[in-house]
Amino acid sequence: MRRTRIATGVVAVLALLALAVDPVAAQTSINDELITELNLELLYVAVVITVIVEAVLIYTVVRYKDNDEPKPTRENRRLEITWTVTTAIILLFVGAAAYQVLGVQAIGGVTAASNPNGVDAATTHDFPGAVGPPQDEQEETVEVEVIAQKYYWTYNYPEQTVDGEVVSATSTAGEPLVIPKDRPVYFHVASLDWLHAFHAPKLGLKQDAFPEKYNTIKTVAYEEGTYQLYCAEYCGVGHSGMLGKVKVVSGEEYEQWLDDQKSEMESSN
């Protein structure tokens, strides 16, 4: 009877855990993919630990619920050593798994894992910190300068110019940050006043915008669509309204968008 109760309790715990885990949706970018994979690895370990702990707890409650003469616990060095070593192994696993992901350019940032053989970054300001793509990726890589200031975003495409004027868009005009699907994209993020943070959660993108200093983050978007952009660093009274959009389009649509922007610039000059 007692064993049946214990088994029932364990099954109930497993059922609740299964219900709590949503099916994994298609990842929108390499950043989102890496974060999701790490979360799943940690989840699998957490599920095993939870089941063991709950099983021990249920067993203890059932086994000793009618004990009217409890005795004090005795020292058990073997048990203490076991749970200390087990905890250390778990922490090492978590640390190693997290470090492997944080060391990737798409998560830790290109600035944090800079490539000494990278080309000069395409930027419009003479701020330090920007890191360009490797030489063998230069032709296929899109570089976008993301400039934050109270309380809007400016998206510059320094490699795309018309009579020396850079193709640009701003969030105040409702214009999105447009990037192509399935191509490496380098965002050079900086601020013109004080701290801001570039955050597109659905794409797994987040990078601090420091005053007059670049932080470069890399992505490859997998899914076309429009994604919400936030400022994730409180920056004053207009912080909640410092919003924008990141629009992921096909390669052909991206080239057409660039041509349209250049045509508009030429007609206005």
Image (cartoon, rainbow, N blue to C red):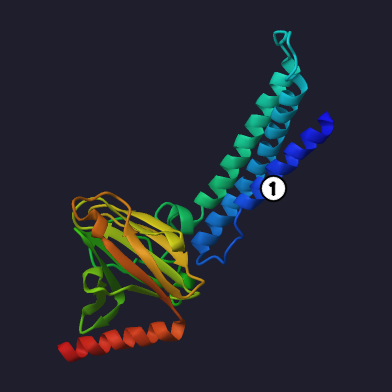
Q: Residue at point 20% right, 89% down?
A: 266
Residue 200 in view here:
yes
* Residue 85 % position (x, y): 68, 27
Q: How many marks overall? A: 1
Question: Residue 57, position in %: x, y?
Answer: 69, 28
Where residue 245 appears, as percent x and y from the top left, is 34, 69
Res. 126 visible in picture: no
Nearer to the camera, 234 or 4:
4
What residue is shown at x 24% (from left), y 54% (from top)? 239
Residue position marked by numbered label 1 in the rendering: 15
The local secondary structure at tag 1 comes to helix
Mark 1 is on which residue type? Answer: Ala
Residue at 21% over, 51% down: 194
Q: Locate residue 269 relative to residue 12 in the image: left or right.
A: left
The location of residue 30, given as percent across then percent down, is 52, 64
In the image, is residue 77 above or below residue 42?
Answer: above
